[in-house]
Image (spheres, helix red, strand yellow):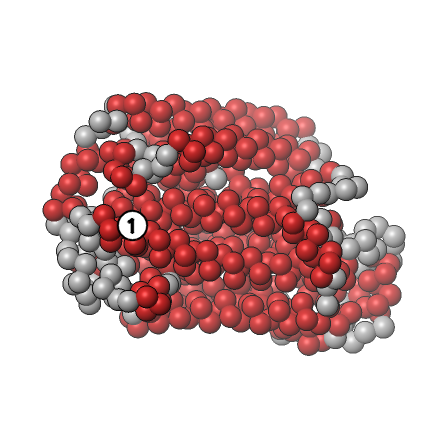
Amino acid sequence: MIDPVGFGSCLQQSKSRERSCHTSGRDLGSLFPYQGAGALPGLVTLSPCSLPGFRKLWAFTGPGFLMSIAYLDPGNIESDLQSGAVAGFKLLWVLMLATIIGLLLQRLAARLGVVTGLHLAEVCHRQYQKFPRIILWLMVELAIIGSDMQEVIGSAIAINLLSVGKIPLWGGVLITIADTFVFLFLDKYGLRKLEAFFGLLITIMALTFGYEYVTVKPDQKQLLQGLFIPNCKGCGTPQLEQAVGIVGAVIMPHNMYLHSALVKSRQVNRADKREVREANKYFFIESCIALFVSFIINIFVVTVFAQAFFNQTNADVNKVCANSSIPHSALFPNNNETLEVDIYKGGVVLGCYFGPAALYIWAIGILAAGQSSTMTGTYSGQFVMEGFLNLRWSRFARVLLTRSIAVTPTLFVAIFQDVEHLTGMNDFLNVLMSLQLPFALIPVLTFTSLPSVMHDFANGLFWKVAGGLLILLICCINMYFVVAYVMSLHNLGLYIGAAVLSVIYLSFVAYLVSQNSFLERIIQP
């Protein structure tokens, strides 16, 4: 049975051992009683509580921007460009809605970390029995590996484009093995320098994709209509599937585990409600700013492809590419089928229409997107493994395992198949990560709704009802996404396998909901 007392006793011990807010300069491992799960060795803890005004906000700035990188990974960029090419400006409101939902969920994850001093995986370890805990861990690990594969694919394609094809795709995949371990050395330079580095990568993405936006000059009226008028007139199945894909690409399950741990890098006296409330406020403001920046970058990509390539045919692009200096016109057959793009073809078609500079700047942006997701995946994996299993691994060993799993299938596809099969893996990976969403949503909504866990900061009735409806909506979207994806494969065996897996999947989601309802009843004071 779930132990209704275990969490409370642990939390009381945590509070009794909490340092004063004004203590600074310590390693995170010395700050939290349960540093065995989720500590960030080598990173310096900040103590922003006593700072005034803007300096205080600046001191809290960092975790939200690291979290926001998941909204800018290669899978998101591909979803953006396909949305623009398939539906024009019509799905911008879906992107905005998905980002807002993501922001509200990240708020809950951050509050859990701030109020309890424990991140989501640690709380799950203390609340769930061994069986559901192991299943949850495996599901989140799948999401992390899927995200890592998208980083590998994006980086390999970017390297191939930047080298004008001289470095083959499999060579780019191998290069990505080394880059991860290089980033591990950033740990020794401290937390703020690491956050500044990721800020630099986000700036590179803003500049490169912003350059494409300025070059293409999207219609501003259509942009505003697409954002603020929820409508998809004339949309069919492809546009509906793309709308569902946006939700799956934007809201990352492992990102909630990550954010709940990153906020522990700021030192807060949890015995003081005012300081906890203030920390929650500043973390939320920072998350708003960070996700607004990521949203603008996503807007750049969607509108560029909506303006330039919506309703274009392969023949249209083939003709333009044949008259350009870009040696890739063979990618687009001379037929009247609607143009289909991915992160590789997207760069090529930009180069054909707007010159080689557009191609290389696009590739730099994709490389920055891929590299920025490397370390966030590494930290997510470490927090999840240590939290769920109470198992400490070195980050080197953790990266070696995750990257090996991610690289192996990607490398085989890169060697034995073409770039279309490689980029096609992103569609499958977006489906995979969308399926994992309930395994982050259910725990975070449940634990932040329990007064015995969150005390005065527990969710009210609105959040409980809205959260339940959101979980139901996500499950429905996932089932639609899976059915649409499997049906496109035209294989009876896959239909049967998907049906069996869907029953198992929904059964486990129902089990988690029932366990959480039971937990809420028995823990209530």
Give the left or right position of residue 440, taking residue 89 as reference: left
State the quadrant of the C terminus. Answer: top left
The location of residue 498, given as percent across then percent down, is 58, 30
In the rendered structure, the answer to whether residue 182 lies left or right of residue 21 reads right
Q: x, y percentage for residue 144?
A: 44, 49
Occupied quadrant, residue 395: bottom left
State the quadrant of the N terminus: top left
Q: Residue 354's spot in the image, x, y percent?
A: 75, 72
> What residue sits 76% from the left and 67% below the top?
328
Q: Is residue 66 visible?
A: yes
Q: Is residue 417 left or right of residue 136?
A: right
Vertical side of 477 occupied by 26: above or below: below
| Badge count | 1
Relative height, residue 239 to residue 362 (above, below): above
Decide which of 171, 94 is in the foreground and name it. 94
9 or 398, which lies in front?
Answer: 9
* Mark 1 secondary-structure assignment: helix
Q: Which sits in the foreground, 19 or 279?
A: 279
Residue 231: quadrant of the picture: top right
Picture residue at 30% right of the left edge, 26% below the top: 519
Q: Position of residue 21 (x, y in %)?
A: 19, 59
Relative to 440, is 20 above or below? below
The residue that mark 1 highlights is 277
Q: Residue at x 78, y 69 (%)?
A: 353
Closer to the camera in the image, 444 or 181: 444
Amino acid at circle 1: Arg
